[in-house]
């Protein structure tokens, strides 16, 4: 397994545009998390899935944000009508039982810049 | 709810000197604790994790951390700093009484290593 993959690595978009990010987790992991990290801060939880079910959403996740995980595999995070305050690193992580026991692995992140 | 406090947003050491990064946590249940390292424009890499098996946890790259319940601390140490250790370090606690739940992160500590 190649770990958690995120695409794209970087995204520059104009304010008001919609963007979508993709995360491919470690295949054995049943949980998938999205976090947001702004400059100089630690990552903050946005939402998580167990298999295909979205079980928790943070109050940080406004109505403009939506996440899906169809069939419990990859996940997408969409931001509609982007605002400058959405500029951040969006991190995906997956967790669950794997060959090493219980793993918790982060992807390299998608850096969003809204201009 | 869990919380994490990292004392010192910036730590500077000389190459070869002891590295000590401080982390205190608050948790209503026995905690699962993590230290992650983040290099610029990268995701988070797991250094080590405490899962109640042993209070002294050894991780990658010569780092270790000691869980002290009485002090609610999980400080990260390395006997001899290397230039390649320069990065940002995050302490995190897992919610839900598992090692694979939602993570709450500290604000991070930037480690600078001088030659």
Image (cartoon, rainbow, N blue to C red):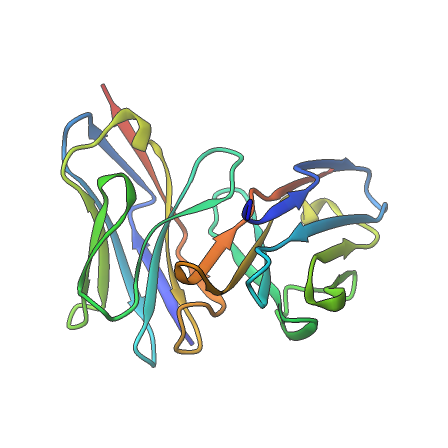
Establish if B80 lies above or below A110: above
- Total numbered labels: 0
Residue B35: percent from the left, percent from the top? Answer: 34, 53
Q: Quadrant of residue A48?
A: bottom right
Residue at 43% from the left image edge and 73% from the top image edge: B95
Q: Quadrant of the N terminus of chain B?
A: bottom left
Residue A53: percent from the left, percent from the top? Answer: 69, 75
Residue at 85% from the left image edge and 46% from the top image edge: A16
Q: Could you say which is closer to the camera, residue A100 or residue A4? A: A100
Residue A44: percent from the left, percent from the top? Answer: 53, 58
> On the picture, is B36 further left or further right than B115?
right
Residue at 58% from the left image edge and 62% from the top image edge: A33
Q: Could you say which is closer to the camera, residue A37 or residue B62? A: B62
> On the picture, is A97 further left or further right than B90?
right
Q: Could you say which is closer to the camera, residue B83 or residue A36? A: B83
Q: Quadrant of the C terminus of chain B?
A: top left
Residue B82: percent from the left, percent from the top? Answer: 24, 28
Establish if B113 lies above or below A50: above
Residue at 76% from the left image edge and 66% from the top image edge: A70
> On the picture, is B72 further left or further right than A65?
left
């Amino acid at each position: 397994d190649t770990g958690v993959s995120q695409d794209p690595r970087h995204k520059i978009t104009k304010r008001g545009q919609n963007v979508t990010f993709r995360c491919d987790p470690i295949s054995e992991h049943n949980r998938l998390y999205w976090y947001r990290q702004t400059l100089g801060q630690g990552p903050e939880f946005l939402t998580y899935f167990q298999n295909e079910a979205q079980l928790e959403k943070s109050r940080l996740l406004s109505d403009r944000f939506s996440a899906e995980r169809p069939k419990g595999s990859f996940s997408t995070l969409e931001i509609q009508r982007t605002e400058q305050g959405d500029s951040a690193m969006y991190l995906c992580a997956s967790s669950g039982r794997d060959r090493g026991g219980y793993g918790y692995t982060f992807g390299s992140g998608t850096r969003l810049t809204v201009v | 709810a869990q919380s994490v406090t990292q004392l010192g947003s910036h730590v500077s050491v000389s190459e070869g000197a002891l590295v000590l990064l401080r982390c205190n946590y608050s948790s209503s249940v026995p905690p699962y604790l993590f230290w992650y390292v983040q290099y610029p424009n990268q995701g988070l890499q797991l250094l080590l994790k405490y899962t109640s098996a042993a209070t002294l946890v050894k991780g990658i790259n010569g780092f270790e951390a000691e869980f002290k319940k009485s002090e609610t601390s999980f400080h990260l140490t390395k006997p001899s700093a290397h230039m390649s250790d320069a990065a940002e370090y995050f302490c995190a606690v897992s919610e839900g009484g598992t090692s694979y739940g939602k993570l709450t992160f500290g604000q991070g500590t930037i480690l600078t290593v001088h030659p």
